[in-house]
Image: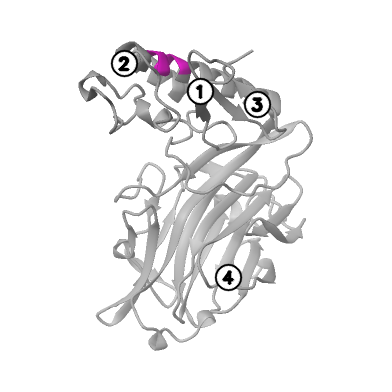
């Protein structure tokens, strides 16, 4: 029964890994009668990069240095770390990409980043497709979209488009945004890629919009560091240096009614798992124990030997809008059991009550 339940949850949301999100995103208002649905993400949990999602670029020359897998690690604290360091006579940094693993058109792309501190190299979050070299399509068959590049150690950040290849026909347009305090702490960098427009965001606030070179082709995500004079003299840098990525997420605009159906189906499946838990203990998890009690044995159980979990094979799913489900036991609507619900973008609750 538990295996069937876990498989059912996977089938409903096949593209989402069920790690709990660390921070909620500030998403742009969705169009009328539509909402945002999380369709892909990586929270960089664990100690090993998920190779089903990312390809690490091999050791090879790149601009003023070398890309090397040695520069790419997870820190075990929920972050991707791409370092810049000196190895003998050469400088190395790194790049990861989702090519062949996740390629997508349109939606909202966002990464939460903490910047490097030294000159001579710059970090970037970008998307690009195989058609970027196609000349004459005006970018429709592929555009390099630099959601951010950070060559300066001040409040400036650059957002850029490249299309019509990288040769004599190359075209580009860029915007430099100034964001006070951007070099300190964590910041989010977002792109709403529409069929007719790009809108760029920093910390959830719009910084630039343009209708130029709007791609209609699937593109893949890249996180990279580059060594070069655009960022200053690498010889003046105190190394190693690094930039950190807390997460990368991609959302699609969906019909609200479709997302609501997914939420209702997930709530039904979670209810089945909670009933399995209750059959072992005679009670449901408390509000404090929450839905995580379906995956991890709570420390405060009166008889831990009765816990026969995990009652879900995968992590507790997020709702279709990328948020954790709400759980309360005993419930207000269901006083003998529990309340389990989600809140849609329209503010309406979808729960296990009538």
Q: Is residue 172 above or below residue 341?
A: below
Report the residue marked by disc 1.
Answer: 12
Q: Is residue 234 left or right of residue 214?
A: left
Q: Is residue 73 above or below residue 101?
A: below
Q: State the mark number for residue 281.
A: 2
Q: Could you give the CA–CA distance between mark 3 and mark 2, rounded to whole angstroms? A: 29 Å
Name which residue lies at 34% across and 29% down.
295
Mark 4 residue crowding within 10 angstroms, few (<14) / some (14–19) / many (20+): some
Label 1's element? helix
Helix, strand or loop: magenta stretch? helix
Residue 112 percent location from the top left of the image:
52, 57
The disc, 2 or 1, on the residue closer to the chain's N-terminal end is 1
| Quarter of the figure with residue 18 | top left
Q: State the mark number for residue 349.
A: 3
Residue 261 percent location from the top left of the image:
62, 20
Number of callouts: 4
Label 2's element? helix
Q: Is residue 220 left or right of residue 54?
A: right
Residue 82 percent location from the top left of the image:
39, 64
Mark 2 residue crowding within 10 angstroms, few (<14) / some (14–19) / many (20+): some
The disc, 4 or 1, on the residue closer to the chain's N-terminal end is 1
The disc, 4 or 2, on the residue closer to the chain's N-terminal end is 4
Q: State the mark number for residue 182.
A: 4
């Amino acid at each position: 029964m538990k295996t069937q339940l876990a498989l059912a949850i996977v089938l409903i949301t096949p593209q989402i890994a069920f790690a709990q999100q660390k921070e909620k995103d500030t998403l742009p208002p969705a169009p009328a009668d539509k909402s945002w649905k999380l369709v892909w993400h990586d929270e960089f949990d664990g100690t090993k990069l998920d190779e089903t999602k990312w390809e690490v670029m091999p050791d090879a020359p790149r601009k003023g240095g070398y890309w090397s897998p040695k520069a790419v690690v997870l820190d075990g604290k929920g972050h991707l770390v791409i370092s810049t360091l000196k190895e003998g006579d050469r400088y190395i940094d790194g790049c990861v990409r989702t090519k062949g693993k996740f390629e997508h058109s349109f939606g909202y792309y966002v990464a939460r980043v903490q910047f490097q501190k030294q000159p001579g190299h710059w970090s970037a979050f970008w998307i690009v497709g195989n058609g970027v070299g196609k000349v004459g399509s005006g970018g429709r068959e592929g555009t390099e979209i630099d959601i951010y590049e950070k060559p300066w150690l001040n409040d400036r950040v650059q957002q850029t488009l490249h299309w019509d290849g990288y040769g004599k026909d190359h075209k580009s347009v860029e915007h430099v945004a100034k964001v006070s305090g951007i070099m300190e702490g964590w910041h989010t960098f977002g792109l709403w890629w529409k069929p007719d427009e790009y809108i760029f965001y920093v910390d959830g606030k719009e910084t630039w919009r343009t209708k130029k070179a709007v791609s209609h082709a699937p593109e893949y995500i890249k996180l990279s560091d580059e060594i070069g004079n655009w960022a200053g003299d690498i010889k003046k840098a105190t190394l190693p240096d690094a930039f950190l990525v807390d997460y990368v997420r991609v959302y699609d605009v969906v019909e609200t009614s479709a997302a609501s159906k997914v939420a209702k189906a997930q709530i039904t499946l979670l209810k089945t798992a909670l009933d399995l838990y209750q059959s072992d203990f005679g009670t449901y998890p408390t509000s404090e124990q929450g839905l995580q009690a379906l995956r991890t044995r709570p420390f405060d159980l009166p008889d831990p030997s009765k816990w026969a979990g995990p009652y879900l094979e995968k992590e507790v799913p997020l709702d279709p809008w990328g948020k954790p489900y709400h759980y309360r036991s005993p419930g207000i609507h269901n006083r003998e059991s529990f309340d389990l619900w989600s809140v849609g973008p329209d503010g309406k609750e979808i729960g296990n009550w009538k």
